[in-house]
Image (tube, rainbow, N blue to C red):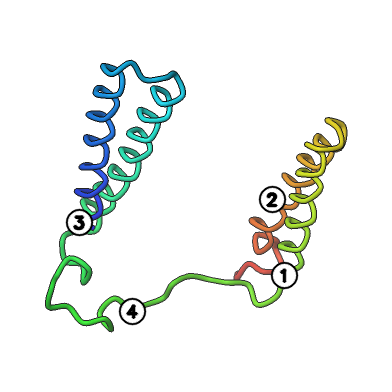
Amino acid sequence: MRFGWQLFGFLTIFYLIVTLVYWQQGGEIVGLTALPLSAGLALIIAFYFWYTQRRLGDNHPEDRLEAEIAEGAGEIGFFPPYSWWPLAIGFTATLTAFGLIIGWWLFLIGVGALVLSVMGFVLEYEKPEYQDH
């Protein structure tokens, strides 16, 4: 993790320096907007890596050169064995994209359906039948 926040911290400083040089050279407004936003995004990632490293401690396998690959193994997360929600998300995302082409009325219907399908996917296992008592 240490390398991650140092890398993105360097990128933040780099983007800020490039922004100043670009501004001094009379750069266009799009570049003067995109470069500080890139610095901000790099700063967000650097802060996340720094905060995570500080909270979890310094003893990570990816920070040691002599670490083995197996030391980083562990539980990745929970993945549902079957779910119809990704299909619904894909369909409603397509509907939303078509709404940008066809009309705002279809876009709004697609956004509403997309929000509902994402909520269904995220909250799928929050139903009382899946909770352990």
**At x 84% / y 39%, what residue is drawn?**
109
**x, y percent for residue 104:** 83, 30
User: Measured from the top left, where is residue 24 in percent x and y?
Assistant: 26, 16
Q: Which residue is mark 4?
A: 73
Residue 120 occupies which quadrant of the picture?
bottom right
Split into 4 quadrants, where in the image is the N terminus?
Answer: bottom left
Q: Residues within 10 Å of mark 4 (few under 14, many from 20)?
A: few
Rate crowding at label 3 as few (under 14), some (14 to 19) or many (20 or more) other CA atoms within 10 Å. few
Real-space Cα separation, disc 4 to disc 3, in angstroms: 19 Å
Kind of residue sitting beneath label 1? Ser
Q: Is residue 19 left or right of residue 99?
A: left
Q: Nearer the viewer, mark 4 or mark 3?
A: 3
Quick one: label 4 or label 1, which is nearer the N terminus?
4
Read off the residue under disc 2. Answer: 119
Q: Which residue is mark 3?
A: 3
- Give the mark, 2 or 3, whose residue is nearer the N terminus: 3
Q: CA distance from mark 2 to mark 3?
A: 35 Å
